[in-house]
Image (cartoon, rainbow, N blue to C red):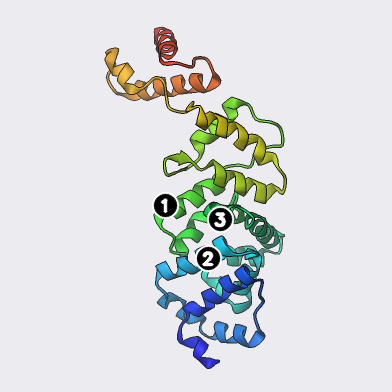
Amino acid sequence: SAAFTEDPTRVLRLAQFAGRFGMTIHPETAELACSISDKFSAIASDKVWKEMRKLAGKSVQPSLGLQALADTGWIEHFPALSKAEKAGDGTWEKMAAAADRAAFSPEGIRSTAVLAAMFQGNPAAKSFMAGCGAPNEDRDLVTALAAVPLPGTEAPTRYQVKTLLRALPARAGTPAIREWGAMVAACTADERANLWTAVAEEILAARELPPLVTGQHLIAGGMKPGKEFKVILQDCLDAQDRGEFSDEPAGLKWMEGRTAR
């Protein structure tokens, strides 16, 4: 009814319902939604994020939620989506397909996987998340994941997986490898991510990531923090990841040899 227009948040709710319950929008409802597009700015940012998070995290078919935004004209309030929808180069279809595949991700990581898959390789991820009113933690996580390049189909080396783990953002202190794997699976529609996540789980379980040579070791050896300090520590970490040493004594010996050069 006409009462629909009393609360503009209903349009965002309509979009997430479309994705969650496999619905399309009645033309008259779409017209009502379009008529109050100018009221978007009246919606508190936390309410915008609440509805968009549900669209991403609870939808069985997020593409229907995205299409609902297009059908109501409200997509204009999300420039990154609007640009993709108008591009006419397959970007919109690719984004929608990746979102739908990511919707099969486990519940706890689904919203992150859907959003990261939608914007994989797209620098607009950050502005989109900010425009949705996403908290900094969620904005930074999705933005960082979307920026990580997709892997090739070949099996990775242990060094490559460690490099990936160090590049990934952390959630609760642990690299977001599950979210990354779900994003990759959604974008590639194959199982290549499994090759990486299996090795990553082994590395994390064996606690191979914490550095064996630290700044305290350098200070104990008489060095003062400075530009060279960071370079030495990074070299030690790279050597550790390459498997050139696997315990602290061997690491210190490697460092001594490195600094002697």
Determine which quarter of the picture holds residue 153.
Answer: top right
Residue ID at (52%, 71%): 77
Please, what is the three-letter code of the amino acid marked with disc 3? Answer: Glu
Q: Nearer the viewer, mark 1 or mark 3?
A: 3
Are the residues at dot 1 and dot 3 in contact (C-beta closer than 8 Å)? no
Between disc 2 and disc 1, whose residue precedes?
2
Counting from the top left corner in percent of width and height, residue 21 is at 63, 71
Residue ID at (46%, 83%): 7
Task: Identify the mark at residue 107; answer none if there is no mark.
Answer: 3
Category of crowding for the residue at label 1, using alpha-carbon neighbours closer than 10 angstroms: few (below 14), some (14–19), many (at least 20): few
Please, what is the three-letter code of the amino acid marked with disc 1? Answer: Glu
Between disc 1 and disc 3, whose residue precedes?
3
Please, what is the three-letter code of the amino acid marked with disc 2? Answer: Lys
Residue ID at (63%, 77%): 71
Q: Nearer the viewer, residue 152 or 170?
A: 170
Question: Would you name the residue on which mark 1 appears?
Answer: 137
Category of crowding for the residue at label 2, using alpha-carbon neighbours closer than 10 angstroms: few (below 14), some (14–19), many (at least 20): many
Counting from the top left corner in percent of width and height, residue 23 is at 66, 75
Residue ID at (60%, 65%): 59
Position of 65 with respect to 45 (left or right) is right
Are the residues at dot 2 and dot 3 in contact (C-beta closer than 8 Å)? no
Q: Is residue 18 above or below residue 100?
A: below
Helix, strand or loop status at disc 2: helix
Q: CA distance from mark 2 to mark 3?
A: 11 Å
Q: CA distance from mark 2 to mark 1?
A: 17 Å
Question: Would you name the residue on which mark 2 appears?
Answer: 54
Camera sees residue 124: no
Q: Nearer the viewer, residue 238 or 38?
A: 238
Position of 67 with respect to 33 (left or right) is right
Helix, strand or loop status at disc 3: helix
